[in-house]
């Protein structure tokens, strides 16, 4: 096994159990290693710190598999890690009864670069690091054995693979995809998942608990769901008794699935749902000009800032949509606003939204701070893994109070 020597002092983050070793921390590689090969990580003083996957083209030059220098990285290792990831979720009461669940969440499950989502009988995997790519067969075999899934489909078509020098890859790796639409039950609502052509692995599982939160707040309200994708928040709002739900997305194919999702749930009142294929930035302005008002608005935009480098432009986009949303809210209304940008932290997001509220001239207060569901955990040693943040805000009626003249 090749040995990766760190610069003096650079062992500190590894000792804190941070799984990434950046190019600037690497002093030298002793011996030969191909992309994805396991290397021994050694401090400048010669102390063995653990084992990592070598990735020569990536800025993240190595990702720790284990912080124990004596643990072999082999088939049995991946079987144990996969089994543990699946087992703790199966035993977690907050995830009980969900057909759709993230089974492996990369670094937080001790498997950097590995994502696995389960949708009923199908698991979808994504490998985004050289190390994960190297061990793909072991990981897929372990998943098949541990989950008993009928099929495992690969969606390694994420852009981040390029940073590791990996080509996109998709296709069935195990079993056969069931014929016809794949349906999952999420908190009492049936949703269709397109694992082959949908976004990410087909569905936004991370918003599961937040969609339920929307359902609980929706009764009697006029709801506007922006960036609705296949209608997850919209259907939960209907299930929660919303008076009406207007949903907007720019993707025609996503809206087609959304319409089918409504049909998959005949107990929901389809007459209360409207769908609009449009750009949210333009639609929000058009709704304002048309004099429309809503009592509950959901803003779940795509990642405006994939990294900190895009933060300034992203901040303007977040501010814009939040400002428009505040202007559309009826007094006493609620805004559930999200950012899934890794480049925008919780604190910055809150500041952006506060700026939007102030520009809109409204007083708002935070009722809930929202994050990804617990099947998407964040490693305490690697907080940059936290990407999804949200605020559930109540706008006070003060702005609508009549001006006193006495
Ligand atoms: N809330 C959804 C997930 C939203 S993902 C859920 O719970 O499943 C972001 C969505 O924004 C995608 O469906 C994408 O098609 C849409 N989108 C991206 N840019 C857009 C824009 N400018 N206007 C409208 N929709 C947009």
Image (cartoon, rainbow, N blue to C red):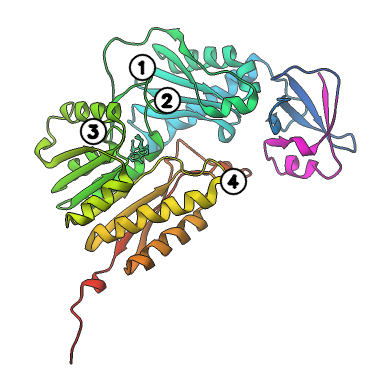
The residue carrying mark 3 is: 189
Q: Is residue 278 left or right of residue 304?
A: left
- Crowding around mark 2 (Cα neighbors within 10 Å: few <14, some 14 to 19, many 20+) is many
The residue carrying mark 4 is: 309
404 and 65: which is toward the camera: 404
Q: Is residue 366 above or below residue 259?
A: below
Q: How far separated are the C-alphas under marks 3 and 2?
A: 19 Å
Q: How far separated are the C-alphas under marks 1 and 2?
A: 14 Å
| Cβ atoms under marks 1 and 4 closer than 8 Å | no
The residue carrying mark 2 is: 201
What SS does tag 1 mark? Answer: loop
Q: How far separated are the C-alphas under marks 1 and 4?
A: 39 Å
The residue carrying mark 1 is: 121
Which numbered disc, 3 or 2, marks the residue closer to the eye? Answer: 2
Identity of the residue drawn at 32% across and 41% down: 227
The boundaries of the magenta stretch are 1-29
Residue 381 falls in which quadrant of the image?
A: top right
């Amino acid at each position: 096994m090749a040995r990766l020597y760190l610069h003096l002092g650079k062992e500190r983050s590894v000792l804190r159990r941070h799984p990434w070793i950046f190019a600037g921390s690497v002093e030298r590689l002793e011996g030969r290693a191909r992309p994805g090969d396991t290397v021994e990580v050694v401090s400048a003083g010669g102390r063995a710190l653990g084992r990592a996957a070598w990735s020569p083209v990536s800025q993240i030059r190595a990702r720790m598999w284990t912080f124990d220098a004596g643990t072999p990285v082999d088939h049995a290792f991946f079987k144990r890690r996969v089994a543990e990831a699946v087992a703790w979720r199966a035993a977690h009461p907050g995830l009980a009864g969900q057909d759709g669940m993230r089974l492996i969440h990369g670094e937080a499950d001790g498997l950097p670069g590995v994502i696995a989502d389960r949708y009923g009988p199908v698991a979808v995997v994504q490998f985004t690091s050289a190390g994960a790519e190297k061990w793909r067969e072991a990981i897929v075999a372990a998943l098949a054995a541990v989950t008993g899934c009928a099929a495992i489909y690969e969606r390694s078509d994420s852009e981040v693979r390029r940073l590791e020098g990996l080509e996109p890859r998709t296709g069935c790796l195990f079993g056969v995809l069931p014929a016809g639409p794949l349906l999952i039950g999420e908190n009492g609502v049936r949703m269709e998942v397109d694992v082959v052509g949908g976004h990410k692995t087909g569905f936004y599982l991370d918003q599961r608990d937040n969609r339920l939160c929307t359902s609980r707040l929706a009764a009697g309200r006029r709801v506007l769901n922006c960036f609705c994708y296949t209608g997850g928040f919209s259907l939960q709002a209907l299930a929660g008794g919303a008076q009406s739900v207007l949903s907007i997305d720019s993707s025609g194919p996503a809206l087609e699935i959304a319409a089918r999702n409504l049909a998959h749930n005949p107990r929901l009142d389809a007459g209360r749902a409207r769908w609009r294929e449009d750009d949210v930035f333009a639609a929000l302005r058009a709704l304002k000009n048309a004099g429309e008002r809503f009592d509950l608005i959901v803003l779940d935009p795509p990642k405006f800032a994939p990294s900190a480098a895009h933060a300034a432009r992203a901040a303007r986009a977040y501010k814009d949509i939040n400002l428009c949303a505040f202007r559309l809210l009826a007094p006493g209304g609620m805004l559930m606003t999200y950012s899934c940008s890794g480049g925008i932290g919780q604190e910055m997001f809150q500041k952006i939204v506060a700026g939007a509220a102030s520009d809109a001239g409204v007083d708002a207060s935070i009722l809930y701070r929202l994050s990804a569901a617990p099947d998407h955990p964040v490693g305490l040693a690697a907080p940059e893994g936290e990407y999804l943040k949200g605020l559930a805000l109540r706008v006070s009626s003060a702005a609508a109070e009549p001006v006193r003249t006495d």
